[in-house]
Amino acid sequence: MEPYRLHVYACEQKKAEGAPSCSANGSAQTIEALRREIQRQGLAGEVQVTACGSLGLCTRGPNMVVYPDCVWYSGVHPEDVEEIVRDHLAGGRPVERLSSGDEAAVRAEIDGNRKKMLAAFKAREDAGVLPEDLHQSINGFRDSRAILTAVELDLFTVLGGGGDAPGVAERLGADPRATEALLNALVAIGLLEKSQGTFTNGPVAARYFVEGAEHDSRAAIMHTVHLWPRWSTLTECVREGTSVKRARPDEWTEAFIAAMHKNAAFRAPMVVRAVDMDAVRRVLDLGGGSGAYSIAFAQAGEDVAAEVFDLASVLPITQRHIDEAGLTGRVTTRVGDLHDDDYGTGYDLVFLSAICHMNSPAENRAMLAKAFRALEPSGRVVIQDFILGPDKTGPKTGALFALNMLVGTRGGSSYSESEYAAWLEEAGFRDVRRVPLPGPTDLVIAQRP
Ligand SMILES: C[S@@+](CC[C@H](N)C(=O)[O-])C[C@H]1O[C@@H](n2cnc3c(N)ncnc32)[C@H](O)[C@@H]1O
């Protein structure tokens, strides 16, 4: 079977810093250029590109191999890609000057490199050097902190069309030596580019981290900036069994809701598709945040009205989103406290997205009992959250999110499907079912008889 006329395997192998590899030689840019060029020359239906692990010619990357022609190329950079696509992939004439060499030489080089690699692994193991991925996990905070500091300083916006380190430092009101170190590190991370002492934003930074960019994510990332001091208390929280630093900076709410909104606006259409809206007229969105889900529920049908129930500090932001969506009056807001206040009655759907993880099991049981009373007979509760497996060790995002709740709440955590099912049944719900969604969170849906 051959679903494509040609199949290009392009190596994107990453190796420990200092070791030769295709990724260290810029394979990501080559592969991106190759995919773009194949598209541009109208070959997307005939030629498939698969990024793959090591092809074994590590010192000469980026490497790729074209099947079924069995042509190997080495040292392919973005500027070579047009020629390969035009002459070989379209024209059937391999590009000799980029050939990896004759069969025997290529084979000998691959075998030699494999021996060297195995010897290097053994030497590391014998010396007790930490495995590379573990080393990366332990030191991952450095990348994270450098990016968060740059966002906190709004460095990417300030950099604008580019600048040298002293100029950028002056614009930031920061120290020149320290600014230069940060700029250099951001180049190493891949967010900035540097040429003859001038720094410029790379494409990713320009897309997400610059004021006015279409996908400006700075406000949402500021939420992660605010989480950093809490995570630094994790050791103490584990000893104490609860969060030890719940104080929030003044800018917390705006950044928190911006982060929630970015995720919610993306997920809302798939949540609405997964929930049968046929018999739904009134939705109660408990802790509805920015209102993104309520807006999507209301957009599902002209006779659907949704109410966002949240804290007084949040609802002005919610109202802004409702007005922008043109749903003023059909999506409404109500100030309330999930724990202290009644939820009202007469709803067909009660939605709880990213709420249960903030609470202890006892708080969730009380909340679901109130949600039950708020529903009409046959009404449904829909929970969206990280749902852990029975032993709570995965999925990884959910297991780590339990720590996010440990450092930030009195009794919150990530919970398993059986815990949700037990609380829902205790509250009187029936037909509890889990609906998997793409991404890290799923739905649990149950019905009031
Ligand atoms: C993690 S956010 C989820 C927002 C929204 N449901 C979503 O999925 O995007 C939690 C929301 O619950 C609200 N909240 C937290 N504690 C609350 C309380 N005691 N009463 C009412 N709302 C609360 C927060 O203000 C925030 O909007």
Image (spheres, rainbow, N blue to C red):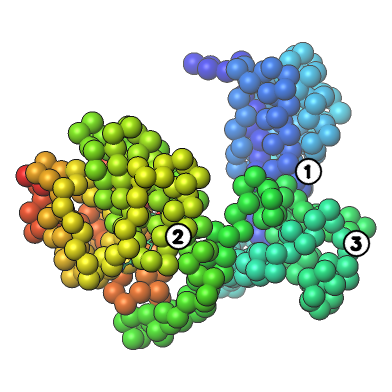
Q: Position of residue 139 (x, y in %)?
A: 59, 70
Residue shown at the point (35%, 39%) measured from the top left: 298
Residue shown at the point (9%, 44%) measured from the top left: 377
Question: For the residues marked 3 and 1, what is the alpha-carbon distance in whole angstroms?
Answer: 28 Å
Q: Position of residue 441 (x, y in %)?
A: 36, 50
Label 2 SS: helix
Name the amino acid type tagged 2: Pro
Q: Which residue is mark 3?
A: 197
Name the amino acid type tagged 3: Gly
Badge 2 density bin: few <14, some 14–19, many ≥20, Cα 10 Å = few
The answer to whether residue 306 is visible is: yes
Residue 364 vertical position relative to residue 32 in the rendered view, above or below: below
Q: Quadrant of ligand 1?
A: bottom left
Instruction: First in sequence, mark 3 or 2: give its number.
Output: 3
Tell me if the residue at label 1 has its CB under 8 Å from ligand 1.
no
Q: Nearer the viewer, residue 203 or 254?
A: 254
Instruction: First in sequence, mark 2 or 1: give its number.
Output: 1
Q: Are marks 3 and 1 in contact (CB under 8 Å)?
A: no
Residue 292 vertical position relative to residue 231 in the rendered view, above or below: above
Q: Which residue is mark 2?
A: 316
Q: Which residue is mark 1?
A: 60
Question: For the residues marked 2 and 1, what is the alpha-carbon distance in whole angstroms?
Answer: 58 Å
Q: Position of residue 406 (x, y in %)?
A: 36, 74
Residue 322 vertical position relative to residue 124 in the rendered view, above or below: above
Residue shown at the point (45%, 60%) measured from the top left: 316
Tell me the quadrant of the picture where the C terminus can be found. top left
Left or right: residue 440 compared with residue 253: left
The answer to whether residue 107 is visible is: no
Instruction: First in sequence, mark 3 or 1: give its number.
Output: 1
Question: For the residues marked 3 and 2, what is the alpha-carbon distance in whole angstroms?
Answer: 45 Å
2 vs 1, front mark = 2
